[in-house]
Amino acid sequence: MTTIELKPSARPLADAEREAILADPGFGRHFTDHMVSVRWTEGRGWHDAELVPYAPLSIDPANMTLHYAQEIFEGLKAYRRPDGSVATFRPEANAARFRASARRMAMPEVPDELFVAACDALVKQDQAWVPAHGGESSLYLRPFMIATEVGLGVRPAKEYLFLVIASPAGAYFPGGVKPVSIWISEDRVRAVPGGVGDAKTGGNYAASLLAQAEAAQHGCAQVAYLDAVEHKWVEELGGMNLYFVYGNKIVTPTLTGSLLAGITRDSLLKVARDLGYESEESRVSLDQWRADTENGTLTEVFACGTAAVITPVGTVKTASGEWTQSGGEAGEVTMKLRGSLLDIQTGKAEDKHGWMHGIV
Ligand SMILES: *Cc1c(COP(=O)(O)O)cnc(C)c1O
């Protein structure tokens, strides 16, 4: 079932107003004219797939999501290519991860075909909202699923809503790429073995906000989390994976079950090899991070995720001291990888891995 009934808005935003938004979209502040909505009920499965005008949802106060947080989401981008066509980056990977998140949260899986068709239908309808080729701007897609059953019993709901909304996103670094400062949280954790850290669920973000506020008190923009058992192994940031650059080799923490398997992370393992670097997954301890920076073998550190693609790490602060990566500047390997991946995404470079999914 992948037929999405089109019920477009009779009153989309005027061209001039949309262009004014696209001139400075920011991130997650403006939404396009439409959304895709698909219902699931026990016994019937997925049905009523439709593209409708973007509008508020009407939710019963006893909606199960509001109380027990069965919610999962995804994030991917549609880019305008040099010839004016539009393509998304690895939507099948997002579809697969969405299914994995659904399984972990005891929610129904959206078939990959339906997931991709829903994203395609929205991008096609709202293609005027995809920023022009040239910069790093894109149309950010946010597929998500909530339970819609009403009741306070604690069990998996029997009704769900899968939605896709879209928001134009400006360049993450409008003034040029700037290294981010990182606070290492040595007491608070993001995820635990056997928990939900590898599911893209809203609760993981709720759990990260206090540590994020503490990072801000220490003058840092982001938090890096350590493993919950030994408080020793570096895991990731609240919404981005980490990479450590050792000369010609890039190393990212192994997916132990409490890390989110980033699609940017996975793509960079391959892009690095294309560029002649080595890439590997391995455990990295906080002590090693610090010692290898001091002895000069660890040359750069960066974070990666769909929103920023790659963010260099500048200052690193812990309760017991701080240090700086690559002189507080964006490193050379970091910037090469960033440029290479963005060139594939924006259609400037050849897509030899078949990652781009053309829509219009
Ligand atoms: C979404 C997310 C990432 C990055 O994943 P991408 O697929 O690269 O965008 C990393 N960590 C967490 C916790 C996330 O939620």
Image (tube, grey):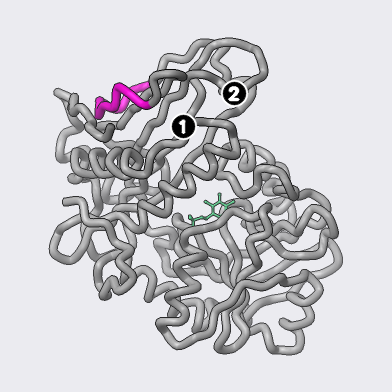
Q: Position of residue 107 (x, y in %)?
A: 53, 31
Nearer to us of marks 2 and 1 is 2
Q: Position of residue 308 (x, y in %)?
A: 46, 60
Q: Front-most of 177 and 93? A: 93
Q: Position of residue 351 (x, y in %)?
A: 28, 71
Reading the image, the residue beneath label 2 is 156
Q: Amino acid at mark 2?
A: Pro
Overall secondary structure of the magenta stretch? strand
Q: As drawn, is 334 to the left or to the right of 112?
A: right
Q: Which image quarter: residue 179?
A: bottom right
Sequence-wise first label, 2 or 1: 1
Inter-mark Cα distance, 2 to 1? 13 Å
Which residue is depicted at the point 64% across and 42% down? 204
Which residue is depicted at the point 42% across and 50% down? 94
Q: Which mark is residue 330?
A: none
Q: Which image quarter: residue 288?
A: bottom right
> What span is in magenta?
46-56
Give the structural element (helix, strand or loop) at label 2. Answer: loop
Q: Which image quarter: residue 143?
A: top left
Q: Front-most of 214 and 120? A: 120
Reading the image, the residue beneath label 1 is 145
Q: As drawn, is 6 to the left or to the right of 139?
A: left
Give the structural element (helix, strand or loop) at label 1. Answer: strand
